[in-house]
Image: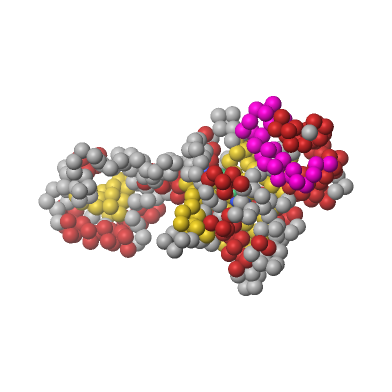
């Protein structure tokens, strides 16, 4: 039987996933709250789906790394292959394709799903994370890219960060295509080459160069490297091409709108096969946390895998783990605020039913109230409030019940107010921030 004998069940959670104790959940709620408020202020609507998807959904366009090494999948009792979703983009593409006829484009959607990837757990990488997905469907021109990247920047600002705290790196898959063509790199090498460039930060400079040399040869590697590290200078060479004009417009419009920390990066490619145009990634500039925080891009050919119509799309995924690390590093997490407004301590020999009636009066006015039913001494009841950050406390005994008045104390300022229920509700309302 559980709980008896020597072999207790472990209290550890499954490897790479997190338990959210109230203090953790409160941070998570804060992060989601800023994300939701920001994207809703731009008119994005929330959608959701099941954690479970048919495994086939990911076979065509999700990255090879995810399919071969990271996907959680199993056979159900009906012998169907099922996956725990590793990302939301195939799901949302499927949903858009399914309602194609009814939807009036452009549509702006967001969601904060939990996703599962079998990774080696480490800083910034876990096996379950939540990811804000912000996507716009039905706009092929550059204003969609600008809008979504501007939203990403706005979320960062709404978390309290300054432009110098992070950098937005941007590149374009179609610009890369044109560059590869110009250098004479065959189409058959393209996906592999993009994958190698994407791995650049994870391997040494020598390794990086050699692996590319093995794929495309010495000469082409030399010209590729000259271009990859040329920064925006690449535009002067490819400037007449549509792909170059497009990304220049995106960058310039973002700068004009005040997104000053956007930089072109020839080595940013992103891992997924479905990206077709502009790709971007946001990096922390603090040397203590020099990581990619989140990213996304244009994927114009994904929805046509499900339907006959082509629907252009642009979006990004922002993970809760990397954002929390960023906010911690930059000291931007607010101190925990309780969701409870008032804590009622009970003096000895008080009629508890009457105290509960008083608590109900507060709750009817949308205030959140805890009644201490521990039966402990008053001093201990008050002590239990330590660290809980509940803004108001009161003690109710027979005398208070008799004359209908009791003193409310602001636990931060120590200010006290004596009043009846209605007056006390008013006091809390006007002093609660
Ligand atoms: P992704 O780059 O794989 O893109 O993930 C986006 C973000 O999710 C990452 O930058 C990171 O913040 C977070 N993330 C990913 N994997 C993990 C993990 N194992 N542990 C913690 N955080 C993680 C996508 O998933 C694309 N589907 C995003 C997208 C949406 N593109 C267009 N629309």
Query: Residue 299 versus residue 282: which sits nearer the camera?
Result: 299
Query: Residue 266 versus residue 6: which sits nearer the camera?
Result: 6
Q: Residue furthest front?
A: 79
Can residue 4 be seen here? The reply is yes
Residue 191: x and y in percent read: 71, 45
Residue 39 lies in what quarter of the image? bottom right
| 302 is within the stretch colored magenta | no
Judge left or right: residue 258 versus residue 24: right
Residue 223: x and y in percent read: 82, 34
Judge left or right: residue 340 versus residue 129: left
Residue 374: x and y in percent read: 19, 47
Main secondary structure of the magenta stretch = helix
- Give me the residue at 50% from left, 35% from top: 123
Can residue 249 be seen here? The reply is no
Judge left or right: residue 375 versus residue 184: left
Q: How many marks?
A: 0
What is the magenta range?
184-209
């Amino acid at each position: 039987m559980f709980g008896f004998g020597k072999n207790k069940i472990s209290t550890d959670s499954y490897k790479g996933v997190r338990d959210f104790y109230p203090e953790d959940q409160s941070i998570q709620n804060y992060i989601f709250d800023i994300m939701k408020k920001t994207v809703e202020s731009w008119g994005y609507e929330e959608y959701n789906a099941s954690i479970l998807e048919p495994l086939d959904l990911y076979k065509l366009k999700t990255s090879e790394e995810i399919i071969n090494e990271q996907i959680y999948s199993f056979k159900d009792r009906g012998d169907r292959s099922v996956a725990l979703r590793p990302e939301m983009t195939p799901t949302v593409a499927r949903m858009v394709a399914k309602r194609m006829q009814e939807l009036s484009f452009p549509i702006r959607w967001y969601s904060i799903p939990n996703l599962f990837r079998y990774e080696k757990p480490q800083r910034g990488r876990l096996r379950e994370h939540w990811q804000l997905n912000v996507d716009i469907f039905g706009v092929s021109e550059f204003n969609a890219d600008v809008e979504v990247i501007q939203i990403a920047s706005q979320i960062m600002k709404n978390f309290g960060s300054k432009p110098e705290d992070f950098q937005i790196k941007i590149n374009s898959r179609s610009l890369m295509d044109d560059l590869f063509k110009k250098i004479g790199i065959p189409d058959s090498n393209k996906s592999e080459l993009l994958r190698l460039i994407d791995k650049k930060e994870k391997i040494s400079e020598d390794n990086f160069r050699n692996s590319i040399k093995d794929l495309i040869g010495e000469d082409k590697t030399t010209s590729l490297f000259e271009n990859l590290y040329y920064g925006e200078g690449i535009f002067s060479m490819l400037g007449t091409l549509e792909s170059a004009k497009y990304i220049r417009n995106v960058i310039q419009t973002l700068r004009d709108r005040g997104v000053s920390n956007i930089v072109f990066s020839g080595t940013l490619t992103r891992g997924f096969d479905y990206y077709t145009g502009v790709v971007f990634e946001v990096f922390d500039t603090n040397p203590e946390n020099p990581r990619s925080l989140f990213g996304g891009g244009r994927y114009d050919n994904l929805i046509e895998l499900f339907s006959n119509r082509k629907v252009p799309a642009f979006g990004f995924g922002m993970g809760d783990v990397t954002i929390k690390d960023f906010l911690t590093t930059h000291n931007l997490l607010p101190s925990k605020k309780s969701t409870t407004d008032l804590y009622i301590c009970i003096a000895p020999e008080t009629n508890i039913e009457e105290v509960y009636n008083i608590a109900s009066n507060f709750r009817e006015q949308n205030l959140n109230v805890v009644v201490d039913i521990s039966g402990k001494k008053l001093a201990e009841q008050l002590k239990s409030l330590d660290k809980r950050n509940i803004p108001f406390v009161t003690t109710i005994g027979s005398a208070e019940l008799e004359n209908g008045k009791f003193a409310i104390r602001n636990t931060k300022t120590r200010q006290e107010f004596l009043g009846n229920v209605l007056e006390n509700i008013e006091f809390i309302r006007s002093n609660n921030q």
